[in-house]
Amino acid sequence: MILHLIADAPPPGWLKVENHRSIRKVVALLIPGLLPSFLALPPLPTSATANPNLPLSIPLPTDSSTEIPFIASTFSFACPTRAPGDQTRMYSVLSSFFQGPVSGEEKKKRLLQRVAYPVRYLLTLEQMVENDYPIPSYMADIFQKPPGWLETTEPSMESILLLPTDQQQSRVYAIDCEMCLTEDGKELTRVCLIDYTSGITIYDQLVKPAKPITDYLTRWSGITEEALAPVTTTLTQVQKHLLTILGPSSGPTSILVGHSLESDLKALKICHPRCIDTAIIYHHPRGRPLKPGLAWLTKKWCGREIQTRGDGGHDPEEDARACLDLLKLKVQNGAGFGEFRTDYESIFERMARAVGRGGPGTIRSAVVDHGNPSAMHGSKANTVIPCTNDAEVLEGLLQSVPGHEFAFGRFTGMLATTNLAEPSPEILSSALANLNNHLITLYTSLPPRTAVVLFTGHSDPRKMAALNARKSAFESAIRSGKTAEDIDRELWWTSSDGRELEEEVEKAKRGLLFLGIK
């Protein structure tokens, strides 16, 4: 919808805007924690097992009956929304909002660009953060390394400035690790490294954990007590050896390829800047954000089966070689190989390409948000303003709107308040009043013909989160070797709990959207 209002996208099927080219600017505000009850609205209709359909719009009550008078006096209707997710989880509203399908013309252009170098498939910083990778300190101040962690030496400026065609000689290694369970949780027990060019296994080492082993996890790791008995190699020795291989001693920093590679890096306690993840460059048949399994990918695209040893566990050399072969297929067949659904791109990329308002590059965008948005959803915006509270978000929007056609801001004060177990009436009233005042101040400053898009993203997620935490704890206990009899009955996870979780997830996904033009 936003791309239709200020760029060149076709109109959405559910909304018609007359004379949309008269709109000069769009301001989008995400306000999580703004619940229907604060607007004197009944709970949104929902059913995870019956009819999930929602009414297209709900008339708003008068401003005298709501705790946010600005919304009732400015907008006429609330449009129910549904956050992305599956039956048991809700996915990121931010990621969904800032990503849109690539147009048919752009996708054809991308598919014609047959990518001949592995370097083109490197994860961006945004992708690494989104997928919970440990980030080297010289890339961004995001990940605080605990004791015992190391990072690859920072790449030289010369290697960073090289074009992809100059980097075809970059060293690429496929890696896979196996872990066992110790008193301190999972620890590394084996690591395997295979050279991309030659296919030779250059490092395959069993590792002795620092803490006593409580479960060898043989049915997954393939590691046995007998295999580890004579091993003396420690994690520190493995780290030292790998850093000599991966560092930029001669030429560009090496590239690591793996499947859900963040797990291997965490097992190694190493931060590395140049990563390729086959769980990301290949698609799940049901589309993102689901990730495909390595065994399924290898069967589908390489035509062979792996991980068939049953209780004998996985073979890290076999898994690493599968990642290597999947990357080679991607390089040989192009970026579209292994994809099932429409590719996605940042809405800022789409805005930058739009030709409807003076040509490409004429639509300027701004993101004003908490934390470090430049490392994530705001990385491709023209202007990014990081904030620590809602007052700073308001100030940033007041500064940004005059010089940008699109501005996004997120007020989180209500989310922080509703996340409290039982916020006092005074705290809740203060948070609602602050939000109402922020909205009035911002709206008053907007120039005429500005479209205002205000959305909550989701409802109260606390019950969903609590149930998921209980489910994860129970599954973790079972994976660690405990039986149901070893677990307190009140901590059991049953089929009725599963049905309750589905209901709570569906409730949490429900949000509200308000549309208006000043």
Image: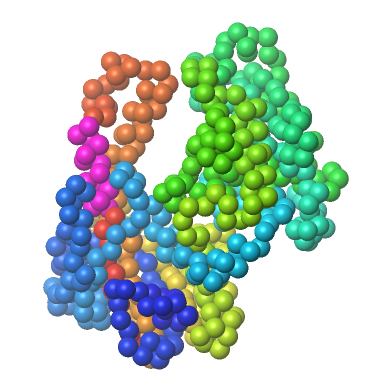
219 sits left or right of 232 in the view: left
Q: Residue at x 42, y 64 (%)?
A: 97
- 161 displayed left or right of 412: right
Tell me if residue 155 comes above or below residue 501 in the rendering.
Answer: below
- Of 192 and 62, nearer the camera is 192
Verify whether residue 485 appears in magenta. Answer: no
Q: Residue at x 64, y 52 (%)?
A: 333
Q: Where's the N terminus, which quadrant? A: bottom left
Classified by dominant secondary structure, the portion drawn in magenta counts as helix
Quarter location, residue 134: top right
Q: Is residue 215 left or right of residue 87?
A: right
- Whole-percent x, y for residue 41 in the image: 16, 66
Point 21% across, 39% down: residue:
499
Front-most of residues 276 and 491: 276
Residue 430 sits in quarter? bottom left
Q: Is residue 458 visible?
A: no
Tell me where residue 104 appears, x and y as whole percent.
50, 69
User: Which residues fall within the magenta stretch?
Assistant: 495-508
Residue drawn where x is 63% and y is 49% of the image: 330
198 left or right of 49?
right
Q: Is residue 503 magenta?
A: yes
| Image quarter (top left, top right, bottom left or bottom right) of the C terminus | bottom left
Question: x%, y% of residue 77?
Answer: 21, 75
205 or 403: nearer the viewer: 205
In the rendered view, would you say 335 is above or below 402? above
Measuring from the top left, give residue 154's x and y in whole percent.
Answer: 75, 49
Q: How many marks?
A: 0
